[in-house]
Amino acid sequence: MAIVGHFESLAEAQKLVQSELLAGVVQEVYEEGQLLQKLPVMVIDSKSVTYNREGTLPSAAFYDIHEQIPWSADTSFTAVEASLKISARQDILDKFMLKTYKNPNDYRTIILQSLRKGVMRTIEDKLIYGNVDNDSAEFDGVGHMLPADIAGGEAWAAANAQAYDMGGASAPVTMKVLRELIDAVRPKPDVLLMTRTMRNTLSATAFEKGLVLANTHPVRTLTGGTDVFGARVDYFDGIPIVISDYLLDETDNTVNKDSGNDSGISSIWAIRFGSVMDGGLCLIVGGDTGGMDFFNMVELENLEDYDAGGIRLVAYCAMAQGSSKATAVIHSIDEDGVIVG
């Protein structure tokens, strides 16, 4: 046993001192690529918004002189509805802790900071991976707003003209298919959304390793620049690349999250933002949703049978996509595979 002087043991001496606890919580979860700040917001005063997409357009025909011209009736539309969904979280605020747990951290402040960050992460996740078929209480994210759900084998064909199946774990993306992705969004996408690994693979191909087409000269396909804050931005054919930490590894032949986030397969999305009637992708909100804090906070003064109050955060929101051509995706990509053409 160590001799510490005066005290029977080191444990006795340590009873007289304590570690200094710093106020606050150090950030450990860093994420970028939030879609919420990029989406135009449409405020509605009803439970849903309904709009019509062009279906069958009228056409003309050619006739001989004095030939009878028939009456035509062939125009049709496709009705689309986007319904508001309720996203909420509520936590108890124990009044004893509220009044006594203040040094060095304020109990209420720490809870509020954590809640706000957590609920916003939930919304960001659902903007990509929301699926009404799995949970009718949530809204569809971009992965389930395509003309048809991903089933594998897509090749910009009529059944799902906005999707392309790259082929899975050993199939890296190609420059040709990337350009076809851009062409699939009309008139032009605002961003290309991809994982950090996928961006780094493309960047290394363009700026470091070089892309060799049929053993000819290396071709630079990406350009680089900075945003208004001086941060690096890469462009593919003039379209800014947005890294999203909310876009995860996915299971093959889907645009759904891989449970372990380690499949090495991911998707690249081309997205055009805009209002519904402009044919773009936007966020619809109702009530008090959509302000500076997005979630409306309700404080409950007293909970029955408890010496406690509560905090409830509520948002009424959903995604709406005007034209089916506002988004397109290449899925099942080997995100760190060697790009050869």
Image: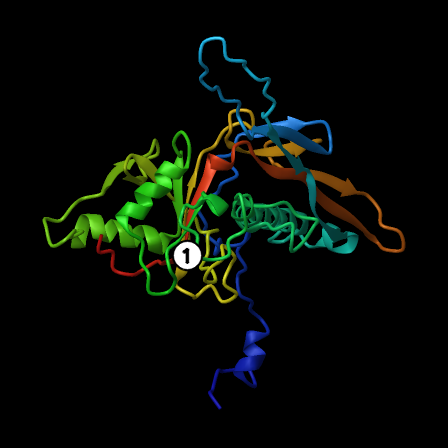
Residue shown at the point (65%, 56%) measured from the top left: 134
Q: Nearer the viewer, residue 272 or 324?
A: 324
Question: Going by the picture, which residue comes out furthest to the bottom?
Answer: 1
Name the spot of residue 305 as percent of width and height, x first: 89, 55
Mark 1: amino acid = Ser
In the image: residue 43, left or right of residue 39:
right
Residue 261's place in the image compared with 73, above or below, is below
Q: Nearer the viewer, residue 340 or 5?
A: 340
In the image: residue 2, left or right of residue 240:
right
Residue 319 appears in the rendering:
yes
Name the spot of residue 230 as percent of width and height, x first: 31, 36
Question: Going by the picture, which residue comes out furthest to the top?
Answer: 66
Residue 217's place in the image compared with 57, above or below, is below
Q: Nearer the viewer, residue 283 or 157?
A: 157
Residue shown at the point (25%, 56%) measured from the top left: 339
Name the spot of residue 15 as percent of width and height, x first: 59, 74
Residue shown at the point (58%, 71%) measured from the top left: 16
In the image: residue 194, left or right of residue 81:
left
Residue 314 appears in the rendering:
no
Residue at the disc numbered 1: 266
Name the spot of residue 18 as percent of width and height, x first: 56, 67
- Tag 1's secondary structure? strand
Number of numbered labels in the structure image: 1
Q: Nearer the viewer, residue 193 or 110?
A: 193
Question: Going by the picture, which residue comes out furthest to the right?
Answer: 305
Residue 285's place in the image compared with 331, above or below, is above
How dense is the environment of label 1, judged by Cα within 10 Å: few (below 14), some, or many (20 and up)? many
The quadrant in which residue 231 appears is top left
Residue shown at the point (54%, 47%) measured from the top left: 148
